[in-house]
Amino acid sequence: MLGPRRDGNPGEGLAIEEDETFPMDAQNFSAPTSGAGVIHANVTHTTNFTVVGNHLAQHEHLSLTAMGLALHIQSLPAGSRIGVKHFAARFPEGEIRVAAALRELEAHGYLARTRERLPSGRIVTRTVSYNNPGATEPPEPDGDPDPDKAPVPDPDKAPVPDPDKAPVPDPGQAPDAVPSPRQESGPVRGETPALPQNPAVELLLGLRRHDARFLLSERDIRHLAPAVDAWFARGAAPDAVRRTLLAALPETLRHPAGILSHRLKNLLPPPLPVTPLVQGPPPIQICVTCEEVAFRAWEPGRCPDCDADADAAAVAA
């Protein structure tokens, strides 16, 4: 084996001769010399993938169970059935860990769960998953986003109309049979559904009456309405919510929807303490496990069926 040799000029450093120890076609990996740290072997996905932000993947306060559950929920198609029992049957984590992870995601804005009563009288839980809590999408530009890149017609190929050879309409053809420019251009794009009529939407629409800068778009209102509903669910009155959103605003307001989203998320009041009623039946509670069965109790908990399942699982263990 040949070792390193030094050339005659000391300023040129060391020159390594070729031998079996230093093959010229050896592959060079850009990895730390100490061997510590992760090496990413990434392959670009083209199908069947989900985009997740680092704000979730590297969250400082969420548990690993909550992060993984948020990733799984974001990968599900719209309308998929989710719940504590469903996830406990799908994954090795039990109902207690799954329920705690869901509460973490709800506390940090990645989930919003509201209870609604159907016309049949059944109470169900509606769940909204947010892939980037507190963020608002930029408004869509009007017209062509880049007019400079619009195709320019070729003057050599484009036909030039001759006024002396203009087409003469057929006298026997009815005027209604002549296609209008609208009919030739194709079908008109469908209109966006109207905003729902509820207290949260009405509050957001009414902010412009107090400050003209809060002329919100329909997209902003749809995004902010669930956060306003969360305030109402914790006992906040509409006037109190409005005062909090409009208090001490800066003189220059560049992103009205952004500051509303920030205040709704970070200034959310704590839930009211549950006090038992002196008279009358206990309040209606929703089972914390199945999130479907309604029952009367002074405090939140499991329904009788879920209690029986938990007792049977404890005996079997």
Image (spheres, rainbow, N blue to C red):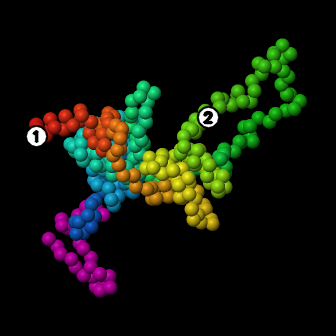
| Other-residue count near label 2 (Cα within 10 Å), few / some / many at <14 / 14–19 / ≥20 | few
The residue at the point 42 percent across, 26 percent down is: 120
Q: Is residue 94 left or right of residue 184?
A: left
Q: Mark 1 highlights which residue?
A: 317
Looking at this view, is 28 or 256 the one in front? 256
Question: Looking at the image, is 308 positioned above or below residue 246?
Answer: above
Q: Earlier in the sequence, mark 2 or mark 1?
A: 2
Whether the magenta-drawn stretch holds residue 168 is answered as no
The residue at the point 61 percent across, 47 percent down is: 205
Residue 37, numbered label: none
Q: Position of residue 265 (x, y in %)?
A: 46, 55
Whether the magenta-drawn stretch holds residue 4 is answered as yes
Q: Is residue 188 left or right of residue 226?
A: right
The residue at the point 28 percent across, 49 percent down is: 100
Q: Position of residue 65 (x, y in %)?
A: 27, 50
Looking at this view, is 83 or 287 the one in front? 287
> Identity of the amino acid at label 2?
Glu
Which quadrant of the structure image shows residue 23?
bottom left
Secondary structure of the residue carrying numbered label 1: loop
Q: Is residue 292 left or right of residue 312?
A: right
Question: Looking at the image, is 256 positioned above or below residue 174?
Answer: below
First to last magenta residue range: 1-30
The answer to the question of whether label 2 and label 1 lie on touching residues, with beta carbons closer than 8 A, is no
Residue 191, numbered label: 2
| Other-residue count near label 1 (Cα within 10 Å), few / some / many at <14 / 14–19 / ≥20 | few
Q: Is residue 8 left or right of residue 249?
A: left
